[in-house]
Image (cartoon, rainbow, N blue to C red):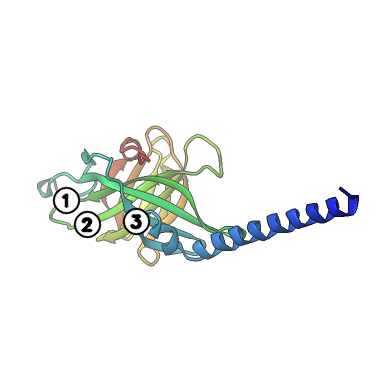
Amino acid sequence: MPKLAIVRHLLAFLAAVLIVSTAIYMYVLWRNHAPQQVMDAAAGHIVYQAAGMAIGISRAPAAAAGRIHAEPGQVPAAAGQAEAMTGATRVMLLRYTADGGWVVAGQGRAVSVRANPGSGAKVQLALIPNTAVGLAGAYWLCAWAPRGIDAMAVVNPAHPRATDMFRFHAGGIIEPVSLFPDTLLEGRQGSRTVFRLPAARVLTAGTPRE
């Protein structure tokens, strides 16, 4: 076969590869141009969206439901004990990237924290590993659907003055946090602590099964 024919075949092959690659890339961008489209593939929906990040939830049929307990915090003893309910809800943290659109940055299990019945306060939250940092204890604090709570506090009992306070914006929180074995998560209403929950108990709620 003449060299010119070989070159032509090679160029035709490279052109075909380029066309297919471009088509795949454009399809991925189209599919991921909105966070809800990413969640559609997981049979879920967006519950909170901020600038460049979003929280989506979907049901995970293989997971089992359970219950963990939180400390009541600064509330009347007669109001009862706060509870955190764990269900089969998978949380997906989405991040916007310039080259791939909206992509899944991490996954975790949702925990529904209900404060004492008298207060009616509750919130949905999840702790998702922050793989971009790559350090032990690096997580994303994801919280949404607050009722009777205007902020979340991440408290390290060994260094209480280093407490991180995150207020809800448009009904949600997505913030990077550093967790230690004794870190506490607190729901705040003004200066009052509505509930107190060990972060370790949220983590032991498990990760989604595929």
- Residue 116 badge: 1
What secondary structure is marked by label 3?
A: loop
Alpha-carbon span between mark 3 and mark 2: 28 Å
- Please name the residue shown 50% across and 34% down the image: 136
Residue 84 drawn at (x, y percent): 23, 45
Q: Residue shown at 79%/53% (left/top)?
A: 9
Q: Amino acid at mark 3?
A: Ala
Looking at the picture, tell me which residue is in the foreground, 202 or 6: 6
Where is 171 relative to 143, above or below? Answer: below
**Residue 81 sits in which quadrant?**
top left
Question: Which kind of residue does numbered mark 1 sit on?
Answer: Asn
Provide the residue designation for mark 2: 121
Q: Earlier in the sequence, mark 1 or mark 2?
A: 1
Where residue 8 sits, quadrant-wise, is bottom right
Label 1: how many Cα within 10 Å (few below 14, some 14–19, many 20+): many
Pointer 3 residue: 43
**Nearest to viewer (mark 1 / mark 3):** 3
Mark 3 or mark 2: whose residue is earlier in sequence: 3
